[in-house]
Amino acid sequence: MRYFFLVILSIFLSQNMNAQIYEVGIFAGGSNFIGDVGATNYISPNQPAIGAIFKWNRSPRHSFRASIIFSELEGLDSKSSDQRRVERDYSFSNDIIEISAGMEFTFWDFDLHKVGIQGTPYIYTGITTANHDNFYFDENGIITSENTSSWAYGIPMVLGYKTNISNHLVLAAEIGARYTFTDEIDGSVPDAEFRERFSFGNTNNNDWYVFSGFTLTYTFGRRPCYCNF
């Protein structure tokens, strides 16, 4: 996983370094899960999330963006507002490593070579893939590992606001929901088909998770020419 991210980063850095401006930095915040186990609050961080982020600014209005984020997704039925879940009292935690790539669009021009403080709201979308362990709840409600892991592909929907706080530093706050194409992260659907009888919950609704937090990036590169894109 580490090598994959380094390859992606190398590809971005090799693209016309002297003609564009780049950002590299960190993400720090929290995560929460929305699925068949635990609370269903859309924004309710209950576990820390941390990662690295890279941007290739192609114009004052859009950037190519890649990130890798580490977190633990947690679901506790005891924290749910649904009395049926509270009585069931399931709980789980699942470590994930998410890789994301896509495009970030700003609402207004955000030219990092202009003098002075500027800021703008932005949205980000693309594709994500998150590696997670597989498990299920047996007939007694006990978590049982399947001793396998899977990749959960999804679509990020991120809304944020960013501002430059110095000549080379950009601070942003963002909330990003991830709609996944799987229902396995919380153990409600076992990975192995022969364990299908242990499935529960609404199998027509896939899992979601949300990252809420801040990014701090360092900018570098010469003044770009946006006229060719």
Image (cartoon, rainbow, N blue to C red):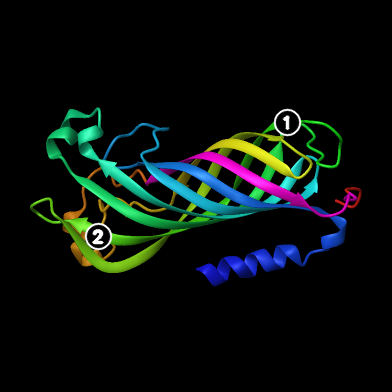
Q: Which mark is residue 119?
A: 1
Rate crowding at label 1 as few (under 14), some (14 to 19) or many (20 or more) other CA atoms within 10 Å. Answer: some
Q: Is the residue 191 above or below the residue 211 in the image?
A: below
Residue 43 percent across, percent down from the top left: 42, 32
Amino acid on which disc 2 is placed: Phe
Secondary structure under the numbered disc 2 in the rendered image = strand
Rate crowding at label 2 as few (under 14), some (14 to 19) or many (20 or more) other CA atoms within 10 Å. Answer: many
Residue found 56% across the figure and 36% down from its top: 174
Q: Is residue 223 magenta?
A: yes
Q: Is residue 51 magenta?
A: no
Residue 11 percent across, percent down from the top left: 70, 67
Count of picture labels: 2
Residue stretch in magenta: 207-225
Most foreground residue, 200 or 159: 159
Q: Which residue is mark 2?
A: 135
Q: Which mark is residue 41?
A: none
Residue found 29% across the figure and 51% down from its top: 93
In which image quadrant can residue 197 be found?
bottom left
Most foreground residue, 207 or 90: 90
In which image quadrant can residue 168 be found?
top right
Q: In the displayed structure, does residue 160 sit left or right of residue 45? A: right
Most foreground residue, 175 or 178: 175
Residue 147 percent across, percent down from the top left: 26, 69
In which image quadrant can residue 78 be found?
top left
Q: What is the magenta segment's predominant secondary structure?
A: strand
